[in-house]
Each structure stands twice: as C-alpha cells, then as structure tokens.
Image: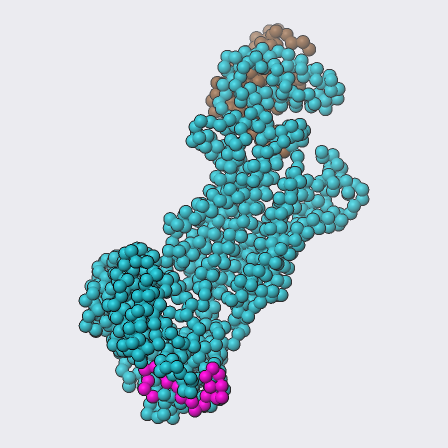
Amino acid sequence: MPDWKEIIRSRVASLSLSGPAESELIEELAEHLGDRYQELCSGGLAEEEAYRQVISELSDLAPLKATIAEGRRGHAPDAEPSAAGPSSNLAEDFAKDLRYALRTLRKNPAFALFVLVTLGLGIGANTTVFTLVNTLLLNPLPIRDSVKLVAIAGSETKTTSKSKALLPLSYADLKDYRAENQVFSSLAGYISPRVVTLHAGQTSERLFSELVTADYFLTLGLAPAIGRLFDPEDDNDPGSHPVAVMNYATWQGRFGGSTDIVGKRLRINNLEFTVVGVAPPRFIGLNALFGPDLWIPCSMAELLLPTEMRHVLTDRSKTEFLAVGRLKDGTSRAPVQADIQTIASALAHAYPDIDGERTAAVRPLSDVLFNDAGTGWSPVFLGGAVLLVVVGIVLLIACSNVANLMLARATARRHEIAVRLAIGANRARLIRQLLTENMLLALLSGVFGLVIGSVGVQSVWSALPSAANFATPRTDLTVLTFTLTVSLLTGMAFGIAPALRASSVELTATLKQESGRSGRSRSTTRIANTLLVAQVAFSFALLVLAGLFVRSIQRAYEMDPGFQPDRLVILLTNPGQAGYDKARTKAFYRNAGERVARLPGIESVSWASNLPLWARVVNGVQVEGRLQRSKTDTVTSVLNTVDVDYFETAGIAIEKGRAFTDADREDSKPVAVVNQKLANDYWPEGPLGKRIQIPGEAIPREVIAVARTANYSTLAEPPQPCIYVPVSQNYSDAMVLYVRTKGDPRQLLIPIQREVQAAGPGIIASDTRTGRTVIDNGLFQAKVGVALLSLFGLLALALASVGLYGLMAYSVSQRVREIGVRMALGAPQQLVIRMVLKQAMTLVLAGILIGFLGSLAAARLLTRILYGVGANDPLSLAASGCLLLVVSLAACYLPARRASRVDPLTALRES
Amino acid sequence: MQEQPSDREWKKGSAELLVLSLLETRAKHGYEISKLIQMRSGGALSFHVTTLYPLLYRLEERGLVTGRWVEKANQRRRRYYSITPQGRKVLRSQRESWREFVAAIGRVIGGEHA
C-alpha cells in the first residue's frame, strides 16, 4: 500500500503550512487517495496501474495550492482541541478540553448513560451511607466547641458487674461535684427522657421530657431559637418553676411553628407548665438518635417523676443523673480524672454508707451520645463502619466496570491517538484531554449520585417511626464535599489507567495496521479479567454477609427470649401522670384487669412495671450469705414489679417455689422471686428461703421462687440477674398491662384498649402492641442493616453481571475468526457454547473462591452482632453461590449463543 | 472522452451547485462526494482531489458548508462536510437560477416550428 501521506506531504511542503493545518490537509487528502486506490484495485486494476492513475489525478495541485496560498483554507478550527503541544494558557486549554469532552459525550449517548447510571448508583450508595454516618456519628451535636465537653458517670469501685455502663449520679453528689471541682467552667446534670402526658382538652397524648439542671443549656453553649433557655433561678425552690423549653422540631411539627409558643401554657401530668423558649434547630439533647420534646428544670422532678423516684433531689442514694461538663479554657483532660476522683474520695469519706464504694469517671461524650454500655464498639459505630466498607466495595465494582469499558474505547481509538502523536501531539496534553473527559463523566455521575443519595436517605429514614424526636439526616457541606471527593477519586480510578494506556500506543505498529478492528493487547485482557474476578469476589462476599444477617435475624426470631411473645398483648398505662392517687390507681389496676379478663378470647391478665426487652436496673442489691467485703459491696440487678399471674401471663416458667398470690399483701411478709442467673451466682445450694434487699427498702425480702432467666434488655443478651417483687408490696403508679390471648392477639387490641380506657378515664391507653411487635422492634436495627446489606449485595451482583456480560461479549467478538475456523472444521454449536461458558465460569469460580475466603474473614469480625450464626454458615454460602452462578450463567449465555451462531464463511472472511 | 473547454466552463459554474445539493440530505466526506458525482452523472462528471478540495475549502471559507472530523467505531477518522443554513439559502437560489437557465437554453435550442 503506497504511503499517500508522504506523497502528499512532499507535494504540499512548499505551502509552509503550520503543523496542525498541514497534518489535517495531508490526512484528508491521503484518505481520499487511499480510497481511490482501493476502488481502482477492487475494480480489477493492477496495483501499479492503480497507483499510476491516482498519481495522475494528483498531477495538478495548482488550484489547491492557490486556494491555500490565498489563505482560503481558513476553515473554522475544528471541534477537536489541538494536541500539538502545551499551551501557555491552561484555562483556555481546559475550556477546550471540556467542550470537546461534552461533544464526545453527546455523540455517544449510550456510553455516557451507561457510565452515569453505573457510577451514579455506586456514588449514590456511598452518599446515602455517609449522610447517615455524618448525621449520627460525625456531626451529631450542633454545639459549639464540643471537644471541650466530657461526661461524668458514676462507677463502683468493687462490683461483680462486668459492665462499664454509664452509672448515674445522685443529685446531691452532682451538686458537690459542681461546687468542688477545679476543672469545669460549668457542670450540668440531666435525667434521660421520660414519658409525660400532655392534656389538651378532652384528649391526651404522650410526649417525652428530659429533666435538666438550669445550667444544662449554658454548659452546652446553646442559644435559644426564640424566647429564653433556663436561668440559674430555675434550680431554686423545688416545685416552683413550672417552665419548659421546647424541642425545635416539636415546635414546628406538633405546634405548627406558631409564633405565640413562648408563653403558651401546657398541661403536663396535670400540672400547668409555661413554655419559655425553643431550643435551637437540630438539637435533640445528648443523644445521637433520639431526644425529648421538652426540657424541664429538675427542680420540678418531685412532681413529675414516678413514685419510686420521688425525693430524687434530696436522697443521696437515688442515682438518676448523668452529668456533662465543659472544661475550663486551657484545661486538658488528664487532670480532670484526678480532680473528679479526689471529690469522689471525699464523698466516700463523708457518706460511707452511700458513697463508700463509689467513685466517678470521666467519659468521652460519645459514650453518652451513643449510649455505649461499655461493651466495646457501639453498634452504631460498627454498623456505620461496615456499611461504609460495603458501599465502598460497590463503588469499586462500578469503577472497574467503567474502567473496562474505557479500556475497550481506548483500544478503538488507538489509531486516532497514534495519528495525533505522530503529528506532534504532546503526550501529557493528550492524557489531560482524556482525563478531562473521564472527570467530566465522574462529576456528572456525582451529581446523579447526590440525587440518588438524597432519595436513599429519605427512604431509609422513612422506615423509622415518624416523630420530632429523631435526629434529622441532612445533606450539608460535609456530605457535598464527600460526594465531590468520591466523584473525583472515582474519575481518577477508572480514568487514569485507560488514559495512560491509550496514550502509550506503539506508533509504527498502530499506524501500519490496515484494519480498524485491532483487538486488545494481552495485558489489557489480563487487566480486564482480573477486574472481573475481583468484582465477582466482592459480590460473593457481600451476598454471603447479607445472607448471614438474614439468617441471624431468622435465628433471633427462633431464639427463646425467655417469655412467650406469641398471643401476647402489651399496653402501657401511667395513672400517676393522669393525676390518680394511690387508692384510685390500685382500683384502676383491679378494674381494668377484671374488665379485660372478661373479654372473650382472653387466657390471663396481669401487670408489670417493665416492658418486655426494656429493663429497669437497680444498683445496690444486697444478697444474704454473700461474702461482702463491706456494706456497700452490692449487686446490680434488673428489678420488675409484677402482679399476681404475671409469670403465667408472660409465659415465664417458675422453676422452683411458688409465684406471687393474693396472700402476698402490703402488710404480709415481704417476698421476692429471683431468676435462675441470680440464684446460680449467689445461692448454688438453692435460693428458696434466702433473703435479698432492694436498695431503698428497709426490710429484706424472702426469696420464694426461682424463675427461668429471660432476656430483659435485648434479644440474645448474656444472662443477667433479675428480681421480681409483687406490686402489692412495691406500689408503682405506672404499670404495663400484660394480656395472654387464646387466639390472634391483633384482633383483641382494640377491645382491650377500650376496656382499659373505660376503667381509667383520663389515662392514656392507646399504646397497645403485641408481643411479636416487641420482638420486631427489638430487631429493628438488625433488619435495617440486613435490608441495606442485601440491597448493596444485589447491586454489586447486578454490576458484576453487567461487567461479565460485557467482557464475554467482547471476548467472543475477538474470537470470531477462531470460532469460525472451529465450526468450519466441524465443531458442533454445543462445543462452542461450552467453550465460551468455560472461559467465563473459570473467572467466576475463581472470584467465588476468593470471595469465599474474604467473606470468612469479614464474618469473623462480625460474629459479635450475629445471633447464633457462624461465619461459615453453609446455607448462606450455598444460597449466595447458587445465586451468583445462576446470574453469571445468564450473563454469559447470550454471548455464548451468539458465538455458536457465527457463520463460518463470514467469520473466515473477516480479517 | 477528452474534456472540452466548454465542459470545463459548465463544470465550473455548476460545481458549487453539485456539491451543495449532495450535502443537502446529510453530511458526507470528500471521497463520497466525488464518487456520488461520478455515479449519478454516469461518469460524465468527475471531480478529482485537486479540484474537489479547493472547492470544499472555498465553500467552507464562505460559510456555506462546515467541515468536522468524525471518528466512527473501527474506522479511521474522516472529515465530513455538512451544509449550513446559509448554504441552503444559496443552494435554493442556485437551483432556481439553474432551472431558469436550462429552461431558457431549452427554449432557444428547441428548434423552430414548421
């Protein structure tokens, strides 16, 4: 084939055109002459004759030279930016590159759409998870200088409890810490949110309120949205400051953002409170997830708290307050612990009976925010970390798909790039152009991903019960920065390798190639195969993890929580908050129980102070016969006040002894039932007849029975001690109704509610749920995790399948000649299909093997949050493997079938 | 057939019209334009590279066509020419002029009636 370019170059050299202009002219004319030459040869002319004829047509270049010499060849600069060399104006070059990139994308809409959707989904998934992590973990408090805030919690110097849970302080101790410390500019206390009843006309509703010291908002450095926050005077004269500060979201949601909220009177627990101000937006208290509707000065505690918590402001033994302090300027954390412990020692010395074995510890605020029970990593942290890793993997899979596509495109453009390099294009400039195209794609995908992320966050959050008290995820500057960074890194990840490879063509070999259908190099194919194996491996690992979590939830439902959740109805009541006195409350419990028991389909009815999976814990239990090092060497236990028939109704077996009866009255011998855990720990010889003393009670109780150990706080928790006392001997003005039904409990929810409301006018009795609902709520976090993991696992699988299909389709297209030869030699279609599938499934199986090892490692890290499922659960592994194999086979089948339908003649004619 | 001077004159006058009309429906590259002219004229007209491209460049300079490099999958890139709105105006006008011219010539050389 003659070198038409050289021929033309020599003819137009005299025109002295600039480099790019000359190159383009030569290229255009050379193409024409080459086509003319091919036409003549195909028409039967000998090569020499064809050459002579073409040259003869080139004989008179005068008109062309004249046109060009006149400067008439001043056609508008082409759309393609010049790659001739570096320009001194980077901004101009960048603008050109950007315009060219936009044009390229417009010309290849299918390619652009594929990349946008693939990367958009990956970036969107990352944005969703990061928004949640940012809201809950990174920026949970809209508080200034939160690094200066620390929590102060009580701890016992000698205790059998292994938990490092935050133990509260007494109000009296808190006042001493506040007065004596040298390290805090301000030290405030608060009691965790509690339910109160808001009366509005004939109706009542539940709100959450948090009792706080007057300096709470000052310590946190907050300013009101409107009105005022608490003053120091609000701590004085207990009972004389019926004021409240409202949660901003509650003001907006429940009260419509009304302008007259400041000064509004609210009837809470039959007491009149005045709203004095609204907290700033986004502040929901010292909890990352959930906060109160109202803050009330703790000077009102005596009037608001349940009976058993009265005297909390004066009784040093009643420990209810958590504390948060703001360090003085210039104070580091190191001396703080020492200072606090000095005060604790002084208190222990001054009050040996109460504080003798107590001390205090300085804890990071995160312990309070995430309610970490000191068990190591908070589930919120762990869940957030796991999800970030998972969506990171999904994005990597998306990037590798796009990278493969880019590599294929780069191969197709090798000739163009070779020409550009041959005519003097600067390699760095070329790489910049290619990268600009890739970064533009990545940024557009980032915008799309941001939209998906917002939708994703709304979808996840909508699964929570709607309430003003929950933290609100938001797309703030941090999230936008994250998304932008991820987009740019994504662009680099999928773009730089193809750009470098594309610009490193071997000029001579590439320019000499006749056909535009040059295939990939071996190394490119290796890269593509490796990427695919990695995709399959990650997808398999994710699917296995999702499968493990599904199985874990399944096991959790199968686990015995220690009580019978089926055919159980639970209803919360709080007669105390409705203004009922003791006599009226007792009458209500009796009447309501009788009315409900008379309903058809009811098996048994009882009352208890604790909800299932909601434990009230007391510290300072004294156990008879236990070797006590001191009077205050006591035990921590769950305490549940229950009525007659409770164990039968809740489905908790009595192992030894007898349950409470009507004979256990207020004036009879104080009795208690303990659980198996407590009995085994302290009375291995048998607990019946032993004595146990509850903190705050003067007389020990006799143990009359042992109940089976149940779950009291969470499902599948480690066993913990529990003490049951009869309500007749431990009055409570807030109890939970337990009803065991004969049939489906859902059908009796309304009738039960009606009977309770009839028995207790003014008492809120609308919070009815079944035992199954309680279990479901207990597994809510795990279910959200499973839903997200499954979604991301399936997304990863879909992306990997698309990648596999693309790779196989391309591979088949490159092997058309080979397949044609095989079929021409007699190979049946089935053999060709098997050949293609074997190539594909080898990669898939390699990916599965690597993914299997990866999933084992990952699952071992997560076993602590899996219920009763091991890292190598065969069902999860088998299901994931089968799903992946089936989907992979489907992805490969089309290319394989296409390969088997290759016409040998056509294939052999292709060069 | 050896080209007569008059042929050259006619070609010169009609060259723009030929090229613009071929570009009316879609963009084409230089070789395609020359092939179409040759095929549709039954070989009577032909434009070689030395005459076609100066014409295309002049049309481009006058803004009647625009040239753009296009790269298609598995092909070398080519310079495609497409007609501009200004070019369409000129084409309409030249077509009309050509029809009138041909009609006028026809009336003259049509022969006298007996």
Say left or right for A723 vs A790.
left
In the rendered image, which quarter contains the N terminus of chain A?
top right
The answer to whether residue A252 of the structure is visible from this angle is no
Q: Colour of chain A?
A: cyan
Residue at coordinates 72% horizontally, 46% vertically from top-left?
A900
Q: Position of residue A393 (x, y in %)?
A: 53, 52
In the rendered image, which quarter contains the C terminus of chain A?
top right
- Quadrant of res B110: top right
Foreground of the two, B113 or A885: A885
Q: Position of residue A605 (x, y in %)?
A: 42, 84
Residue at coordinates 53% horizontally, 28% vertically from top-left?
A426
Prevailing SS of the magenta stretch = loop
Residue at coordinates 25% horizontally, 61% vertically from top-left?
A185
- Colour scheme of this structure image? by chain
Instruction: Tell me, yes or no, whether the highlighted magenta stretch contains residue A225.
Output: no
Q: Start and end of the magenta stretch?
A: A680-699
Residue at coordinates 40% horizontally, 58% vertically from top-left?
A137
Instruction: Tell me, yes or no, whether the highlighted magenta stretch contains residue A694.
Output: yes
Foreground of the two, B44 or A552: A552
Task: Please tell me how many numbered marks the rendered image carries.
Answer: 0
Vertical placement of A688 versus A268: above or below? below
Say left or right for A649 vs B108.
left
Say left or right for B67 vs A381.
right
Q: Colour of chain B?
A: brown
Q: Position of residue A454 (x, y in %)?
A: 43, 52
The answer to whether residue A853 of the structure is visible from this angle is yes
Q: Position of residue A570 (x, y in %)?
A: 41, 77
- Quadrant of res B104: top right
Vertical placement of A836 versus A287: above or below? above
